[in-house]
Image (cartoon, rainbow, N blue to C red):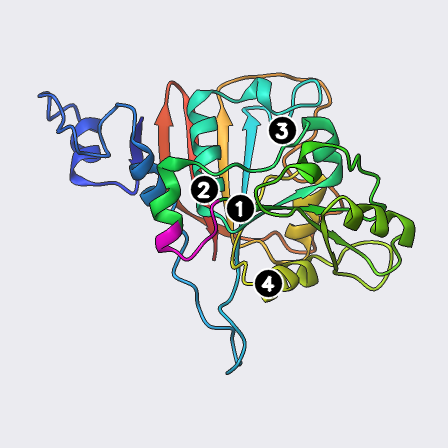
Amino acid sequence: MRRLFPVTDETAARASGEAQKAPDAGSVGADREWSLDELAAAYAYPEPAPAPGATSAGPQPWLRANMVSTLDGAAQHDGRSQPISNATDMRIFGTLRALADVVMVGAETVRQEGYRPARARAEFAALREAAGQGPAPAIAVVTAGLDLDFSLPLFTAPEVPTLILTGAAAAPDRIAAAEKAGAHVLIAGDGVGVDPARAVRALADLGHTRLLTEGGPRLLGQLVAAGVLDELCLTVAPMLTAGAAQRIAGGPSVAVPHRFALVSLLEEEGFLFSRYQRV
């Protein structure tokens, strides 16, 4: 893998055909496999900022999304993202999870992708301990109807209890079933659905300020529309699928497109690993 942006002296030299000698093994501009430590440094969360205009509130949460898309905009193939991913994308996927306090995911993605609980990884244990984090991130499922199989390992065998974000009008029997399975239910909406801003705040109130969402497209669209997404980590796969696959974000369009700035771009075997932050 090599860094294309930000441009450094080395990337500029490589682009112009200079620096023909073998690159320094410690250089992130080199076209080689990066270590997990280098990936963690490349995708580090910003330092938490205090909540604006508040003296007693905790740090401001930072919500990033991690998605993959083909060249023609498909976020899935045959209903799943795995066919358009690759090994390096999955290493970044694992690194982003290891950096997060909690992973937000929509109920439909849980059902389609066969979601499992995040696991503790020895390679990131020291980094998480230094950041004051537990051994693994919690999974937070965003769901209106709680139409979930509570016998799955996501609920029965997580290293940290799975969270469920739902609305106040959710069926009491489904809430009871979730809690009986060991999940922690958070109310983040006055009606049937979830208010994205309240969901982010509810997680922050539990001390989860490094937030990651892995979709799916419906959830990401809701987060975009609510203006709570701070960062997008997007893998662009060098593939064309055609068909009617979903984009990375669905739902109604926003009144004015949200502008994001490119802060990092990596490349390997035609796959582009981009990182954008809200302007």
| Residue located at (38% from left, 52% from top) | 129
Which of label 1 and label 3 is nearer to you?
1
Residue at the image position 32 percent from the left and 44 percent from the top: 41
Q: Residue 134: within the magenta? A: yes
Q: How many marks?
A: 4
Mark 4 or 1, nearer chain start: 1
| Residue picked out by circle 2 | 98
User: What span is colored magenta in the figure?
Assistant: 129-135
Q: Earlier in the sequence, mark 3 or mark 4?
A: 3
Which is closer to the viewer, label 3 or label 2?
A: 2
Graded by Cα atoms within 10 Å as few (under 14), some (14 to 19) or many (20 or more), the crowding at tag 4 reads few
Callouts 1 and 2 close, C-beta under 8 Å: yes
Percent of width and height locating residue 65 = 55, 44
- Does residue 8 lie above or below 80 as drawn? below
x, y (%) of residue 19?
A: 10, 26
Q: Are marks 3 and 2 in contact (CB under 8 Å)?
A: no
Question: Helix or strand or loop: what does disc 2 sit on?
Answer: helix
Q: CA distance from mark 4 to mark 2?
A: 18 Å
Q: Which residue is mark 1?
A: 137
Residue count near mark 2 (Cα–Cα under 10 Å), binned few <14, some 14–19, many ≥20? many
**CB of mark 4 within 8 Å of CB of mark 1?**
no
Q: In this figure, which residue is indicated by the disc labeled 4?
A: 206
Q: Amino acid at mark 1?
A: Pro
Helix, strand or loop at mark 3: loop
Q: Earlier in the sequence, mark 1 or mark 2?
A: 2
Judged left or right of residue 12, residue 237 is right
Which residue is tagged 3? 75
Identify the amino acid type marked 4: Leu
Instruction: State the image coordinates of residue 37 (x, y, percent, origin top left).
Output: 30, 38
Q: Earlier in the sequence, mark 1 or mark 3?
A: 3
How far apart are labels 3 and 4 at the CA level?
31 Å
